[in-house]
Structures are given as structure tokens and as C-alpha cells.
Amino acid sequence: MMQEKNSEIGERLRFIRGIFNEGSKLSASQFAHILNETVHKILNYENGRASISPELLISLYRRGVNPIFILTGEGTIFAPNEEGQRFAERLRGKIPQSFFEQSSEGNALDFNQIRLLSNANEIKSIDEIIEGKKVAELLNLAHQFTAAAGDIMRFLEEKENESKQQK
């Protein structure tokens, strides 16, 4: 039961990391650095292997992320503070509008509703994604993905070296 809850929280934390950089994904090491955590802790939280720390929730809150959203998946992803308002403004136009919408009852949509809306709104072919994009935008996306791939490769190489040293 706790492992399942940690996995759900980890999924939401991974989602936040995916939009944290003005709608662009940060590597786990970049995210950890910003939040003054270790990359191993971030990955353990994201993979549900550890319970998220109160310190991390406070750090995220101070950067505009709603800790209630992280813990429950309910409510808005934006903290009810000035930084939350700034975070929302930085993301407006860069992530699907469904992340800013309210349910028919006036409550913020929960994470599963947002995911369903986003998936329905975001199903596009590669031609639809590329059409209308400026070359600079596409290059920027390519650089972001390349940076993330580089971080993953370095992490895997470190793990491989660690296991070789243990043998």
C-alpha cells in the first residue's frame, strides 16, 4: 500500500520535473541541484522507492509547486503563493490549457483528469508537431533532448563503473 502511494507521488514529482523548466524537462541531476537534493534521492522518490521528504515538499512549495498536488494528485499544480502565480504564468502557453482548467464543480481538476485531457488534446502526428514550428524552436527541443540523453548516459556509465569496482 505504501509502495503504491510512493509510486503515485513519484509519478507526480516526475511530471513536475518534466515541466519545471518553463514547460521543458530537466534532467534528474538538474532538478536535484535546483532543489538542493541528491540525484539518487530524486530518482528514489520518482520511482517510489522512498517517501518524499518534508524538506523537498517545502522546497517545491517555495518554487511555486503545490505540495497537496504532489501528495494527493488533487487540486492545482500551482502553489497558493506568489511563486505559484509566477510559475503558472511562466508555463502559460507552454503546457496544455487543461493544466489551468477547473472541473465543472469549480474545483481544480485532479491529476488523472488532467492527464486524460492532455492526452486527448496532445495526440498529434510528428508532421503536426513540426508544422508551423520555427527552426530555432526545433533546434531548442533537440538540444534539450540531447542534454537529457547525455545526463542519462553519464548516470549509466557511473553505475556501470561502480558495479565494476565492486567486483
Image (tube, rainbow, N blue to C red):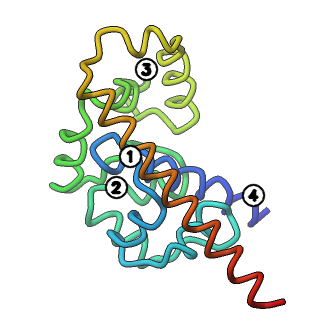
Q: Position of residue 121 (x, y in %)?
A: 47, 15
State yes or no: discs 1 and 2 in contact (Cβ < 8 Å).
Answer: yes
Q: Which of the two discs, 4 and 3, labels the residue nearer the N terminus?
A: 4
Q: Which of the two discs, 1 and 2, labels the residue nearer the N terminus?
A: 2
Q: Amino acid at mark 3?
A: Ser
State yes or no: discs 4 and 1 in contact (Cβ < 8 Å).
Answer: no
Q: Quadrant of residue 89?
A: top left
Name above or below for residue 164 compared with residue 87: below
CA separation in Å, label 4 and label 1:
21 Å
Residue occupying the far bottom of the picture:
166
Q: Which residue is labeled 3 in the image?
A: 104
The residue under the point 34% across, 24% down is 97
Question: Left or right of 83: which side holds 163?
Answer: right
Q: Which of the two discs, 4 and 2, labels the residue nearer the N terminus?
A: 4
Q: Which residue is labeled 2 in the image?
A: 65
Q: Nearer the viewer, residue 88 or 130?
A: 130
Q: Which residue is labeled 1 in the image?
A: 77
CA separation in Å, label 1 and label 3:
18 Å
The residue under the point 59% across, 51% down is 11
As helix, strand or loop, the secondary structure at mark 2 comes to loop
Q: Position of residue 124 (x, y in %)?
A: 51, 12
Q: Nearer the viewer, residue 91 or 107?
A: 91
The residue under the point 49% across, 45% down is 74
State yes or no: discs 1 and 3 in contact (Cβ < 8 Å).
Answer: no
